[in-house]
Image (cartoon, rainbow, N blue to C red):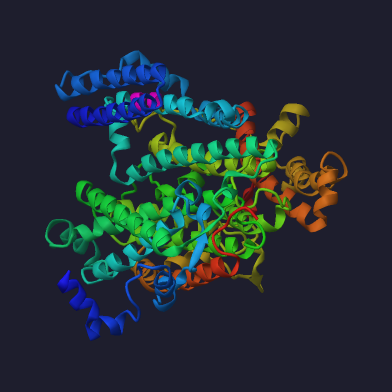
C-alpha cells in the first residue's frame, strides 16, 4: 500500500514537472517555478511513502469530513458546485486553475487512501470503474466547458467557433484510420493491464437465504437505488427510469433552439446545457458515487472514513402528509378515515403539480416558450422536467419536514 | 524490401487488395471504397470533425469494446454452463485453473468500461448539440443502444452465480414487481381481474416474466444467459448497423453548419 502511494505521488510529480516544463518552454518563469515547487511537494510525499514512513491522514481531518457529510450536505454541495462551475466557468476552466483543482484532489485522494475504511471501499474490484468514471467525467466536463468558453468569446466577437477553423477536408486514410488504430491499441493495452492487475470479484456461491447487508444493484444502477430512499419502487425503479429514456429520446424534438449545432457552447444553450449537466453530473453520476461509496449496511449513510457498522442506528421519524394535514393542522385523527378523504390533500397536491402547473406556466412566466414551442412540445418538456424535479423536491421535503409520503394508499400500492 | 515487393506483387496479395498500397491520393481514396470494413467511413472528412478534443473518440471506443466483449464472450462460452450445478464452479475454475482465465477479467472490465464510454459518448454528443437536426433520429437509436448496453451488463452480472451476482439481480429485478398495472405490487394491478380472479399475481407479473420464477433461480440463470449471449447482442448489432448507416446518411461526423 505504502509503495503504491509512493508510485502514485511519483506520477503526480511527473505530471507537475511536465506542466512546469510547458511553461518553461513559453518563457514564463513565475509559473515554471510555482509548478516546480508543487512537484517538489508531491516528491516529498512520494519519498515518504516509498521509504514507508507511514504517514497517515490526521484523525481530526477524518472526523471533520465524516461529521460534515450526510446525504443533505453531499447533495447540496454537488448542486452548489455545479452552479459555481457554470457561473464562474471562465475562471474555473482556465488551465492553471483547473490544474490547481486537479492537484488538490490528487493530493487529498492520496491522503484519504491511508485510511483503512476508505481504502477498503475504493479498492473493491467492482468499484474501480467508478473512480475512472469520476476522473473521466471531471476531465471531459472541464474540456467541454473550456472549449465552450473559448467559443463563446469568439462568437461574442462575431468570429466563427473553433470547430469552423479547420474546415478543409482530409482523407480518412490515413488521418482517421490511423487515429482509430492507435485508439484500439491504447484501449487494448489498458484493458489487458487492468485485467492482469485486478482480479474479477467472485464471492461465496449464491444463496437465496443469506442476503448480504447492504445488497446493492450493479454500480451503474446505484443512482436509481439511491432514489428508493425517497420514492417507492414503482416510481424510483419503473416510472422515473422510463421517463429518463423517454426524455432522452424526445430531447431532439423538444429542443427547438437551432443554435449550438456541432460545436461547444454554453451561452447559446444555457438552459439545455445546465439542465443536462444537472441531470447527468449531479442526479446520475454523483448519486452513483453516493450509493457506492457512502451507503453501507441498511442503506445508512456513512462518511468516507467511517467504519460500516451494521448496528448504526438512524432514527426514522418520517411522517405522511395526511398526518401533517389532518392531525397536526386540524386536530383530527386519521384512524378510520376512508383512504380517499385521508389522502385528498396529497392527491390534490399531486394533481395540481402534474396537471395545473403546466398550463399555469404556459400562461405566465413561460408564455414566450409556449408560443415558440407549440402545445405538444411545451407540455412534453414541462412534464419531463416535472418528473426530473420530483426527485429534488421530495429530497428537500424529506430533509426539511421529514415528509414520508405525499400520497399514501398502501391498499393499492400507490405511494408517492 | 525485396520480400515486401514480392508479397505485394504476388497473385494472392493482389487478389485481396485490388489496388496498390494507399500511398498516393488516388489509392487512399480507392482503399476506402474497396474494403468492406473501411467503407463504413466516408472517403474524406472535415479536419475539425475528427480532432480528439472535439470527438473524444468515445463512440468508436464503445464499438471497439463491443467487439472485445463479443470475442471474449464467445470464448468464455466454451468454459461456462448456465446451470445451478456448474455455473459457479465453472467461474471458479476460470479463476484458478483455466489457462485463459484472464478472459473473464477482460470481459468484465471491458463491460464496465463500455458503460462508461457510452455515457461519455452521449455526453459529448449532447454538449456539441449533435443531436439537433438532421440527427434527431440517430440520437434516439443511440438511446436505445444505451439501454441495451445496460441490459447486457445487467444480464451478464448474474452469470457468475455468486452472492454478488444473485443479490444485485434480486435488488434490480424487485423493481419489476412494482411496475404499474403489470407488477403484482404495482399500483393498479388489483384492477386487472376477471370475475374476481386477479390476473396479476406473483406468478404472472412482469417480474415473473423476467425471472421465469418467483425468485432468482435456475430459470432466471437460463433466461439471462440466453438474453446475454444471443438476444441482446443481436439486437445491439442490428442497431449499431442502423446507427452507423445513419451517421453517414445524416451528414457524417457533426460540425458547425
Eyeballing the image, is B77 above or below A103?
below
Magenta-colored segment: predominant secondary structure = helix
In the rendered image, is residue B110 in sight?
A: yes
Q: Nearer the viewer, residue B203 or B1?
A: B1
Residue drawn at 29 percent across, 41 percent down: A124
Residue drawn at 32 percent across, 25 percent down: A112
Residue drawn at 28 percent across, 18 percent down: A40
Question: How many numbered callouts?
Answer: 0
Q: Quadrant of residue A396?
A: top right
Residue B78: in magenta span: no
Q: Nearer the viewer, residue A67 or A31?
A: A31
Eyeballing the image, is A235 above or below A391?
below
Q: Along the horizontal axis of the image, is B21 left or right of A150?
A: left
Q: Along the horizontal axis of the image, is B130 left or right of A176?
A: right
Q: Which quadrant, please, contains the N terminus of chain B?
A: bottom left
Q: Nearer the viewer, residue B180 or A392?
A: A392
Residue drawn at 20 percent across, 77 percent down: B7
Magenta range is A103-108
Residue A105: in magenta span: yes
Q: Which quadrant, please, contains the C terminus of chain B?
A: bottom right
Eyeballing the image, is B131 above or below A155?
below
* Spot occupied by residue A121 in the image (x, y as percentages of width and height): 32, 36
Q: Quadrant of residue A48?
A: top left
In the rendered image, is residue A62 in sight?
A: no
* Spot occupied by residue A247 in the image (x, y as percentages of width and height): 64, 54
* Spot occupied by residue A116 in the image (x, y as percentages of width and height): 26, 28
* Spot occupied by residue A127 in the image (x, y as percentages of width and height): 34, 43
Amino acid at each position: 500500500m505504502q509503495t503504491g502511494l509512493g508510485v502514485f505521488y511519483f506520477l503526480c510529480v511527473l505530471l507537475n514537472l511536465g506542466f512546469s516544463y510547458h511553461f518553461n518552454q513559453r518563457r514564463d518563469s513565475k509559473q515554471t517555478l510555482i509548478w516546480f515547487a508543487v512537484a517538489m511537494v508531491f516528491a516529498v510525499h512520494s519519498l515518504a511513502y516509498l521509504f514507508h514512513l507511514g504517514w497517515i491522514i490526521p484523525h481530526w481531518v477524518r472526523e471533520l469530513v465524516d461529521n460534515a457529510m450526510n446525504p443533505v450536505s453531499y447533495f447540496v454541495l454537488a448542486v452548489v458546485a455545479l452552479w459555481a462551475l457554470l457561473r464562474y466557468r471562465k475562471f474555473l476552466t482556465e488551465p492553471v486553475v483547473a490544474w490547481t483543482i486537479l492537484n488538490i484532489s490528487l493530493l487529498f485522494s492520496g491522503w484519504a487512501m491511508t485510511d483503512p475504511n476508505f481504502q477498503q471501499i475504493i479498492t473493491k474490484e467492482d468499484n474501480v470503474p467508478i473512480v475512472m468514471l469520476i476522473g473521466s467525467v471531471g476531465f471531459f466536463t472541464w474540456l467541454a466547458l473550456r472549449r465552450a468558453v473559448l467559443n463563446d468569446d469568439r462568437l461574442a466577437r462575431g468570429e466563427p467557433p473553433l470547430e469552423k477553423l479547420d474546415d478543409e477536408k482530409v482523407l480518412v486514410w490515413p488521418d482517421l484510420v490511423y487515429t482509430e488504430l492507435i485508439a484500439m491499441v491504447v484501449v487494448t493495452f489498458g484493458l489487458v493491464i487492468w485485467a492482469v492487475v485486478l482480479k474479477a470479484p467472485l464471492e461465496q456461491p449464491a444463496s437465496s437465504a443469506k442476503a448480504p447487508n447492504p445488497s446493492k444493484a450493479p454500480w451503474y444502477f446505484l443512482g436509481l437505488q439511491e432514489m428508493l430512499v425517497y420514492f417507492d419502487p414503482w416510481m424510483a425503479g419503473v416510472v422515473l427510469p422510463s421517463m429518463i429514456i423517454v426524455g432522452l429520446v424526445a430531447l431532439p424534438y423538444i429542443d427547438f433552439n437551432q443554435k449550438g449545432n456541432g460545436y461547444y457552447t454554453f451561452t447559446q444553450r444555457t438552459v439545455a446545457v445546465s439542465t443536462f449537466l444537472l441531470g447527468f453530473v449531479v442526479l446520475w453520476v454523483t448519486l452513483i458515487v453516493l450509493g457506492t461509496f457512502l451507503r453501507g449496511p441498511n442503506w445508512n449513510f456513512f462518511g468516507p472514513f467511517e467504519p460500516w457498522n451494521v448496528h448504526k442506528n438512524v432514527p426514522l421519524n418520517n411522517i405522511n402528509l395526511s398526518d401533517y394535514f389532518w392531525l397536526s393542522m386540524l386536530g383530527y385523527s386519521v384512524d378510520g378515515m376512508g383512504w380517499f378523504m385521508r389522502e385528498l390533500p396529497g392527491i390534490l397536491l399531486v394533481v395540481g403539480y402534474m396537471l395545473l402547473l403546466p398550463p399555469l406556466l404556459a400562461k405566465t412566466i413561460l408564455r414566450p416558450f409556449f408560443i415558440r414551442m407549440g402545445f405538444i412540445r411545451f407540455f412534453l418538456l414541462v412534464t419531463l422536467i416535472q418528473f426530473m424535479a420530483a426527485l429534488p423536491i421530495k429530497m428537500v421535503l424529506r430533509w426539511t419536514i421529514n415528509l414520508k409520503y405525499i400520497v399514501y394508499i398502501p391498499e393499492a400500492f400507490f405511494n408517492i | 524490401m525485396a520480400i515486401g515487393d514480392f508479397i505485394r506483387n504476388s497473385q494472392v496479395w493482389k487478389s485481396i487488395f485490388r489496388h496498390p498500397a494507399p500511398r498516393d491520393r488516388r489509392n487512399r481514396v480507392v482503399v476506402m471504397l474497396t474494403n468492406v470494413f473501411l467503407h463504413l467511413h466516408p472517403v474524406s472528412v472535415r479536419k475539425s470533425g475528427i480532432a480528439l478534443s472535439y470527438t473524444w473518440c468515445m463512440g468508436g471506443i464503445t464499438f471497439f469494446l463491443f467487439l472485445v466483449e463479443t470475442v471474449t464472450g464467445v470464448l468464455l462460452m466454451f468454459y461456462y454452463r448456465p446451470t445451478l450445478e456448474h455455473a459457479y464452479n465453472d467461474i471458479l475454475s476460470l479463476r484458478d485453473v483455466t489457462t485463459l482465465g484472464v478472459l473473464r477479467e477482460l470481459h468484465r472490465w471491458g463491460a464496465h468500461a463500455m458503460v462508461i464510454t457510452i455515457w461519455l459518448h452521449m455526453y459529448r454528443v449532447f454538449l456539441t448539440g449533435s443531436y439537433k437536426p438532421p440527427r434527431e433520429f440517430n440520437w434516439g437509436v443511440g438511446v436505445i443502444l444505451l439501454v441495451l448496453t445496460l441490459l447486457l451488463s445487467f444480464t451478464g452480472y448474474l452469470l457468475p452465480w455468486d452472492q454478488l451476482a444473485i443479490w444485485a439481480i434480486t435488488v434490480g429485478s424487485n423493481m419489476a414487481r412494482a411496475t404499474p398495472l403489470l407488477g403484482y405490487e404495482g399500483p393498479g394491478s388489483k384492477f386487472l381481474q376477471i370475475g374476481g380472479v386477479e390476473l396479476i399475481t406473483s406468478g404472472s407479473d412482469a417480474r415473473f416474466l423476467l425471472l421465469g420464477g418467483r425468485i432468482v433461480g435456475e430459470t432466471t440463470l437460463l433466461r439471462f444467459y440466453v438474453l446475454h449471449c444471443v438476444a441482446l447482442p443481436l439486437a445491439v448489432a442490428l442497431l449499431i448497423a442502423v446507427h452507423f448507416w445513419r451517421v453517414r446518411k445524416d451528414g457524417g461526423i457533426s460540425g458547425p453548419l
